[in-house]
Image (spheres, grey):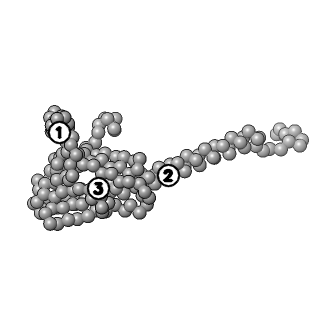
Amino acid sequence: MKRDAPGARGGFTLIELLLTISLVALMSSMFVVNIASLLRNGELETLENAYWKAVDSARLNAVFTRSPHFIDWDEDEQGFVVSSGEKRESFPVDTSEFGDLEIEVLFEEIAPENSYVLIRGELVAKREIVSVGFFPDGTCTPYTVSMKIGEFFTEFQMDPWTGAQLVDPNENGI
């Protein structure tokens, strides 16, 4: 068995200690940044959850009551509203943790494929609409919905035949 030189002690060098401290500091700063991002994304998920609850309610009620139901965004209530004639159901978004962040929701109707709509002398494939219709046969208005809270943004395109979100094949590498 080999012995170390007399008086030699085992331990860490100064460089090893500095490297360890810097790695711990770097990892903790990444953790703090990711937590802040997750909290902001959580706000967007709250908005999305209210939207999907409104979509489910509108589709089911349209099919079961055999009458069209419409979804729109109510700025005053800060939530989605499903309505049909005199009946109205609210899906509010809990904005208590949003601070002073502004919520923006935009519905746009999509023109049929390879066709355009003439608006103010300009051909467009989408146009802003106030509400989206869900019909007794299970279909809905062909539309996209854009949601923005502060700097966080998401957009969905909906399938008019199923009322489900269309998946962009380029996003998933398909």
Is disc 1 surrounded by few (<14), some (14 to 19) or many (20+) residues within 10 Å? few
As helix, strand or loop, the secondary structure at mark 2 comes to helix
Kind of residue at badge 1: Ile
Checking the image for residue 36, the label placed there is 2
In depth, the one of 15 and 25 nearer the eye is 25
Query: Do callouts 3 and 2 mark residues in contact (Cβ within 8 Å)?
Result: no
Checking the image for residue 51, the label placed there is 3
For image coordinates 30% across by 61% down, the residue present is 76
Is disc 3 surrounded by few (<14), some (14 to 19) or many (20+) residues within 10 Å? many
Query: Do callouts 1 and 3 mark residues in contact (Cβ within 8 Å)?
Result: no
Kindly report the distance in space between the C-alpha atoms of the residues bearing marks 3 and 2.
Answer: 23 Å
For image coordinates 17% across by 39% down, the residue present is 119
71 vs 114: above or below: below
Residue 9 occupies quadrant: top right
Is disc 2 surrounded by few (<14), some (14 to 19) or many (20+) residues within 10 Å? few
Kind of residue at badge 3: Tyr
Dot placed on the residue nearer the N-terminal end, 3 or 2: 2
Residue 85 is at least partly visible in this image: yes
State which mark lies toward you, 2 or 1: 1
As helix, strand or loop, the secondary structure at mark 1 comes to strand
In depth, the one of 27 and 117 nearer the eye is 117
As helix, strand or loop, the secondary structure at mark 3 comes to helix
Checking the image for residue 119, the label placed there is 1
For image coordinates 20% across by 65% down, the residue present is 88
Q: Position of residue 28 (x, y in %)?
A: 59, 49
For image coordinates 83% across by 38% down, the residue present is 2
Q: Position of residue 69 (x, y in %)?
A: 16, 58
Kindly report the distance in space between the C-alpha atoms of the residues bearing marks 1 and 3.
Answer: 28 Å
